[in-house]
Amino acid sequence: MPLPGRPGRYHPGMPATFAPAGAAGGLQLVRSACPHDCPDTCALLTAVQDGVALKVQGNPAHPQTAGVLCDKVARDVERHADYLLPATTQLEHWDIHASYGHTEVLLNRPPIAPRQARTNTQVFRGLAARMGFDDPCFAEDDESLCRLAFGDQVDFDALLEHGFAGLPVPDAPFAAGGFPTESGRCEFFSARLARQGPDGVPDHLPNHEAIGSSALYPLAMISPPARNFLNSTCVNVRSLRAEGEPVLELHALDPAARGVVDGAVVRVFNDRGEYFCKARVNARARPVNGLGIWWRKPGLAGTNVNQLTSQRLTDLGRAPVFYDCLVDVQPA
């Protein structure tokens, strides 16, 4: 429902009730927050009337996100589920969020009551009761859990009033030391790490799949983010698909021996799988460069570069090694 101009006494981020154009009753603005794991943790304003959410927009009063939102949509993973539990969205449950992009804590207040869905915490409480667990935490409701999350670090009344509140974090938290190490200093040699087995001094380790290590798969594929996508969040929005379509960039020295021409559909493959997309031949790419930010469903065969990447993990951080991927390419 379109809203009229803001009333003169309306302040973004503050509670307000006013009548939109053509509405019989008042419209309530409820402050909430996005649950996605990204640096911003967007602050939201949800317009609600008679228990129905009419509009979700960014909260312009937030000092970091300033009213900007990314798109919220179901992802590819739902297509492969045998069962989908009807979980609530952020419009239907209490939650509290921190961020790794700023130091504001955001409170998500549910603008509307759950319809045909349950919150994750309701599911856990129901499972606990069925299994006979009686720990005190299972008696806490969602608002109480939000109050406990940051304790005295954050004024919960300020969260209720504004939707966000700053954490008391110093600008230079390690100016006087206090690093989370045994010595309290920034260590070049870690005795704790050495006791776990690895060298106490960080060192370079060779790739699992180094160039030249395989006669079958001579090309190294990397799958960097596309320039115009925020990870994969905006892939579903056609107007934002400035990248056009999934492609594989090949250096001009590579395609001739493989019979590949610019714009042709190619098969990229290794022992883990295969991926079909169009080739883009240029001098920008290194040996082979696959743009891997696309979802599966826009792919030519309903696949993306995840068909090719390894499930191995790095030695210390246990992070993915999806840039460590040998492949070969041939005309489709």
Image (cartoon, helix red, strand yellow):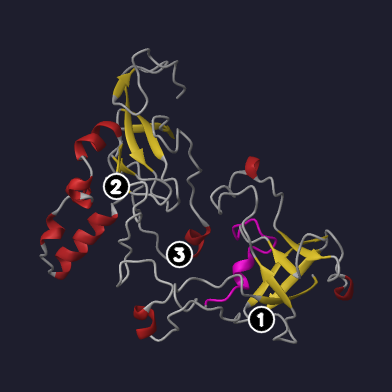
SS for dot 1: loop
Q: What stretch is highlighted in magenta?
A: 294-311
Position of residue 191 relative to residue 105, above or below, is below
Left or right: 51 as drawn, with respect to 128: right
Q: In which quarter of the image is the C terminus?
A: bottom right
Question: Looking at the picture, how far across and down is residue 291, in whole percent?
Answer: 67, 60
Q: Tell me the quarter of the picture where residue 221 sits.
A: bottom right
Position of residue 228 relative to residue 216, above or below, is above
Q: Which mark is residue 96?
A: 2
Q: Name the residue under label 3.
A: 81
Q: Name the residue under label 1.
A: 210
SS for dot 3: loop
Q: Tell me the quarter of the picture where residue 193 sits.
A: bottom left
Question: In percent of the image, x 39 and y 83: which residue is there?
Answer: 194
Q: Residues within 10 Å of mark 2 (few under 14, many from 20)?
A: many
Q: In which quarter of the image is the N terminus?
A: top left
Question: Looking at the picture, how far across and down is residue 166, in whole percent?
Answer: 31, 41
